[in-house]
Amino acid sequence: MHKQKRVNGSSKVRFRKVPELEKVQIDRLTGCTSEPWKRIGFPFPPCSALAHMFVYGNTFLGIKKLPGFFQNLLENAVLLDLGAGDPRPMVDFALACGVRLYLGVDLYLSYKNMSFEDPRIVLENNDMLQYVAKMPDNSASVFLGAIDEIVLAHNKSKQMEIEYESLLLSHIHRVVPPDGLVFGVNSHLFPKLEKMGFERIDRVGKFKISHDAGTAVLQKIE
């Protein structure tokens, strides 16, 4: 498929109103995520390092290895980075792709003193389920930098984790437009999304996409 997808419009997102019953459920689940890297002495979320390797690394899928591919699919579109951590690598990636808007969302790494001159870059400290739930239908491609492996894992309540993940998957499916992308590193959400109307892209032209370290690029086909 891989056809070009352009989304025109203003640089702002018009959030939808979350239905009241769903809002109650999401409010109950907020705080279900965790930050286990602090307990093992990491100074920053490991997902930040994975995003850095995704964009700049030699063994990970980077923008330089697929010239034109991401630009064609993300130019003038919205890119939502869930569990963004330090957003700078993905900001570089997003601007190189010519996105209309980059939305970096993270609950734990404070963005209070972080800002970018480019008005296309929007950062928000928020729970990622709270944020994606208010995104409009068919409005954004999504980057996942190990958020389920690092952020959802280690939760005390397995049942809450299952509920949180199920809602997160349903909203990702709702938010990504036809031909839009879900991509990233180290996420057990990718195989589940493949059962929800997303197709894994294994090859672009003669270039084979490496799946080392859980790297994946999925495109919504239904």
Image (cartoon, rainbow, N blue to C red):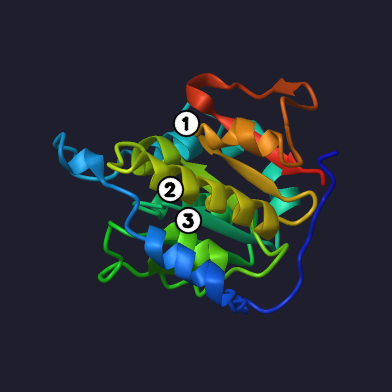
Image x and y of residue 16, in percent: 62, 77
Q: Is 39 in front, or is 66?
A: 39
Q: Is residue 68 visible?
A: no
- Please identify the quarter of the rendering in which residue 174 is found: bottom right
Q: Left of 1 or right of it: where is 152?
A: left
Distance CA(mark 2)–CA(mark 1): 17 Å
Determine the residue positioned at 85% across, 46% down. Answer: 3
Q: Residues within 10 Å of mark 1 (few under 14, many from 20)?
A: many
What residue type is disc 3 on?
Answer: Val
Give the answer, above or below, for where 212 lies relative to 153.
above
Q: Is residue 190 visible?
A: yes
Disc sitting over residue 89 in the figure? 2
Q: Earlier in the sequence, mark 3 or mark 1?
A: 3
> Mark 1 = which residue?
186
Image x and y of residue 120, in percent: 54, 70
Determine the residue positioned at 59% across, 34% down. Answer: 190
Looking at the rendered image, the quarter that the N terminus falls into is top right
What residue type is disc 1 on?
Answer: Asn
The answer to the question of whether label 3 and label 1 lie on touching residues, with beta carbons closer than 8 A, is no
Q: Left of 69 or right of it: where is 41?
A: left
> Mark 3 = which residue?
91
Image x and y of residue 130, in percent: 46, 65
Q: Residues within 10 Å of mark 2 (few under 14, many from 20)?
A: some
What residue type is disc 2 on?
Answer: Pro
Q: Nearer the viewer, mark 2 or mark 1?
A: 1
- Please identify the quarter of the rendering in which residue 109 is found: bottom left
Q: Is 183 in front, or is 16?
A: 16
Q: Left of 171 or right of it: where is 81?
A: left
Distance CA(mark 3)–CA(mark 1): 20 Å
The answer to the question of whether label 3 and label 2 lie on touching residues, with beta carbons closer than 8 A, is yes
Determine the residue positioned at 35% across, 70% down. Answer: 115
Q: Nearer the viewer, mark 3 or mark 1?
A: 1
